[in-house]
Image: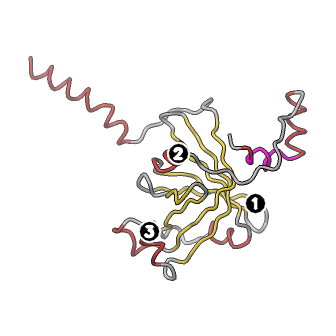
């Protein structure tokens, strides 16, 4: 775990809850700067085909939104920056609007088959695709560039890997097809012998 994560999230009331339930609170590191992604985090992020993005509304309510695309659609620009192209959706623009008032975000990335999850804290901003064609060209697939409305840029503050406990393995249709294909071939071989 990167040190800044606990420094930011283990507040006095969190430490009090830890002490109440476990008899003590976790030590809270101090003075850590922003945490940089390693190759492990970068590879994990670039292999995801979806993630959840949470923001905070002006009224103080959290809002979480799913984002999806081909693996690699969430780009690791460098060890402290992520980016992704945003397409038209339900036209509510809750995430985009929330960022205008409070730029704090949390990304939640899951690998269900491997029972692995990564949480990322950061500051995000959006750039209008009409005003930044260079960002669209950099972060959108060629076939989708015309439909991009904005590009999200996220400055990473910290991250944390979670334990695999209680993660139920789930598989995509493509993952299941890859797992079943050798069985199909074997069944066909056996059927041919009969």
Which structural element holds mark 1? loop
Does 78 sit left or right of 97 as displayed? left
Work out whether mark 3 precedes mark 1 in sequence or the reverse, and give the earlier one.
1
Which structural element holds mark 2? helix
User: What label sits on residue 138 in the rendered view?
Assistant: 3
Magenta region includes residue 42: no
Circle 2 residue = 39
Q: Residue at x 74, y 48 (%)?
A: 4
Disc number lying in front (2 or 1): 2
Residue 12 versus residue 31: which sits nearer the camera?
31
- Which secondary structure is most common in the magenta stretch? helix
Disc number lying in front (3 or 2): 2
Instruction: State which region is magenta.
Output: 4-11
User: What label sits on residue 49 in the rendered view?
Assistant: none
Check whether the beta carbons of the residues at disc 3 and disc 2 lie within 8 A of each other: no
Residue 194: quarter of image: top left
Circle 1 residue = 61
């Amino acid at each position: 775990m990167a040190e800044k994560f606990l420094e930011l999230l283990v507040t006095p009331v969190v430490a009090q809850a830890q002490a109440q339930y476990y008899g003590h609170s976790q030590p809270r590191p101090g003075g850590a700067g922003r945490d940089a992604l390693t190759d492990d985090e970068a590879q994990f992020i670039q292999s995801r085909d979806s993630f959840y993005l949470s923001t905070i509304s002006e009224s103080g309510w959290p809002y979480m939104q799913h984002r999806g695309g081909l693996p690699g659609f969430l780009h690791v620009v460098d060890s402290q920056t992520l980016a992704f192209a945003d397409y038209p959706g339900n036209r509510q623009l809750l995430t985009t609007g929330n960022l205008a008032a409070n730029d704090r975000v949390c990304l939640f990335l899951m690998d269900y088959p491997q029972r692995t999850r990564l949480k990322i804290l950061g500051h995000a901003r959006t750039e209008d695709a009409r005003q930044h064609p260079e960002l669209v060209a950099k972060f959108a697939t060629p076939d989708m560039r015309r439909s991009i409305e904005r590009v999200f840029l996220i400055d990473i503050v910290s991250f944390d890997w979670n334990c695999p406990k209680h993660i139920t393995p789930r598989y995509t249709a493509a993952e299941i097809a890859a797992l079943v294909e050798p069985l199909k071939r074997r069944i066909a071989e056996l059927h041919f012998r009969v």
